[in-house]
Amino acid sequence: MRSSLLQQAAFRSFFAGRLVSLLGSSMAPVALAFAVLDASGSGHDLGVVLAAHMLPLLAFLLVGGAVADRFPRRTVLVAAHLGAAFTQGAVAALLLTGHYSLPLVTALEFAGGVLGAFTTPALRGVVPQLVAKSLLRQANSLLGSARNATKILGPSLSGVLVVTVGSGPAIAFDALTYLVAAGFLARLSLTGTSEASQGDTVLGDIRDGWSAFRAIRWVWVGTLSFCLLNLVQTGTWQILGPQLTRQLSGETTWGFVLSVRGAGMLASSLLMYRMTVRHLLRFGQLAGVLGALPLLALGAQGHAPWLILAAFVAGLGSSVAAVAWDTSLQEHVPAHVLSRVASYDDLLSYLAIPVGQLCVGPLAETFGAFRVTAAAGAVSAAASLIPLASRAVRRLPHAQPDTSAPTPPTAPGTPATPAPQKLPEPTHCAPS
């Protein structure tokens, strides 16, 4: 089955483009961090640059979703990747020529964040245009495998490049990957956009997307669950995780924990290619509970072996939850609102992350870091289970694999034949 999916030219081009782009994106944070720190010697500059990328990514997500539903998604993706190649190339040029400037780098990263806001919703909507509904889980598992593999390889490769040739060339390599990815994406032949956006303007499309999001019970229930999960889990893991791990088991253990968690995610995404369940979303929510284990282990002051084991199992569960969520969205949300519904899902899920990051420090000072971590783990587990109280989540069916061949994509610009559509149901973003 895996080979048959990759033998489809359209999906193969998309997969190759994503693999190249993900590799560059996984390398960029390490290279950018060292580049800014080396050029400025200031942690403040790095904070400004990182915020300049994240804030527009959140602010323009809804616009990106509306644009991806209104215009051909291939065009949106190619334009966004070319723009990202330019912004990253310009940052690399500033560093390579010794002309680092905080305002210029900040402006370029701001532009990169805007481009990212247009990329993410379009990517969610492309996969159902490339493969049959019965192959969506397999497609998402392959894409998840690529993403998880690059998370393991990319930072290490970036570190080697930074040490050997410098951070400027490493960022230039990221820019090159965007160019290569744009070339692969330009070769796609997609069944054009959904019939039409319902609004007369982009603002009208955004309003229609909100109406569709609210109408699909399982989507907004799942999104609220992930909002709560991101609120309590992400900041605690990123901020208290390394501190408490160093206190319990030494500094080197944290690196092993992250690597093992990534290995678990990779293994799980590969397993999901073959695994068939009748209610995929329900299975994903149950698996998501495993993501709380590392926090619970830290809160219980578990030492290295227990923490590493918990991280591996958490990686297994997190990847299952992510594949289940993406596949459920693509199977059940109508194509003409998919990118907009996904953009609301992303926005509401990710807005909680900076709030949690800001709150975890003061809470740890007040109640103690171990107690806060244990409480965050308990709430994370509950957040994954709460959606199962909704019948819409528990009973959502998963399209079973069949032997029928997917409908081949038509040439660009050919009107798509509307597929039978179900009423929308919910979406969810698993924390990475």
Image: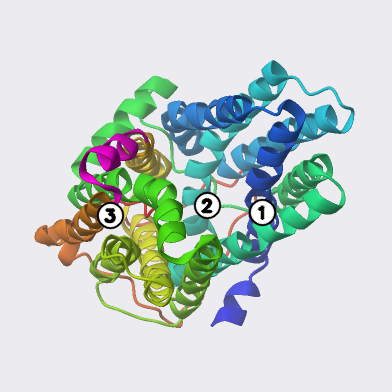
**Mark positioned earlier in the residue sequence (3 or 1):** 1
Residue that label 3 marks: 370
The N terminus lies in quadrant: bottom right
Q: Which region is colored magenta?
A: 358-370
Residue type highlighted by circle 3? Phe
Residue type highlighted by circle 1? Leu
Depth check, front residue: 246 or 351: 246
Residue that label 1 marks: 188
> What is the x, y in percent for residue 132?
47, 67
Q: Which mark is residue 126?
A: 2
The secondary element bearing badge 1 is classed as loop
**Mark positioned earlier in the residue sequence (3 or 2):** 2
Q: How many marks?
A: 3
Q: CA distance from mark 1 to mark 2?
A: 10 Å
Q: Are marks 1 and 2 in contact (CB under 8 Å)?
A: yes
Q: Residue at x 44, y 36 (%)?
A: 65
Q: Quadrant of residue 137?
A: bottom left
Give yes or no for residue 273 being in the magenta stretch.
no
